Image: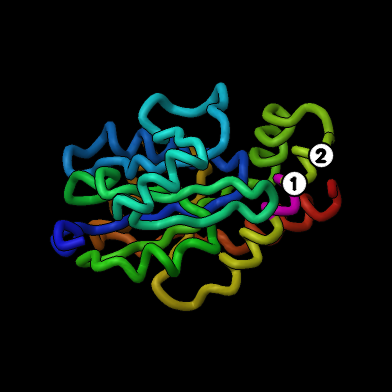
Amino acid sequence: MEQLREKTLVMLVAPSAMGKSTILQTVVSSSNDCERVRGFTTRQPRANDLSDQFFYLTKEELASKKAAGEVMTEVIFPTTGESYGTLSESYSGSYCVLETLANSVAMYRALPFKQTFTLSLTTTPERWQRWFHERYPEMNAEAKKRLQEAVLSIEWSLSQTDNHMWLVNDGTPDEVAARLLAIVGGEANGDDGDRYARAIMELAKQEV
């Protein structure tokens, strides 16, 4: 825990198909001070997972790490029952960047970081709808779960009034990453994302 006191945590919250992984990877590539938080998950790997995104643990391995005191955070995904979180080896760099679930933000804020930023990522409704259907071409049970999660995530973001800003994914990854770094560096106050988020939430409700 002590090593966190000199670090800043940057959390990116968003539903599926907003471009979280792409933006965070671009941020890490753009700044020597930023390192991605490599979390753990008990779910199976996906084709679009980045090579350094997760430690993949069985539930038995996770139980062993808990017993050894190596687990710093854990949250159980509400619709799948799979665990996500971080280990003592997950944090490096002066700025630790993390894509996380809305219901785990408070847990990460409670860790002894020097400073935390919480950014909700959104995009234009047209982009989100296209990206979502590219990822989930069939409206099956998995797609419906992701839509339900999208509504919950956006409702949370819209309710935030403290230590929270919006980041709109409406340009190239380099442009959006540069805006994120400007926010963290105190050079910008965040984007006007409410209207996009509300429109996407209504689309998600319609598709469910």
Q: Is residue 169 visible?
A: yes
Query: What x and y, as percent, mark residue 7?
Result: 19, 57
* Pointers 1 and 2 in contact (C-beta within 8 Å): yes
Q: Residues within 10 Å of mark 1 (few under 14, many from 20)?
A: some
Numbered badge on residue 141: 2
Residue labelled with disc 1 = 145
Q: Would residue 207 be found to the left or right of residue 58 on screen? A: right
Provide the secondary structure element on which disc 1 rests.
helix
The three-letter amino acid code for the residue at tag 1 is Lys
* Residue 63: percent from left, percent from top: 44, 48
Q: Amino acid at mark 2?
A: Ala
Task: Identify the residue shown where x is 26% and y is 41%.
Answer: 35
Write down the region rendered in magenta. 146-150
At x 36%, y 29%, the residue is 52
Measured from the top left, where is residue 75 in percent x and y?
Answer: 51, 56
* Residue 189 vertical position relative to residue 30 in the rendered view, above or below: below
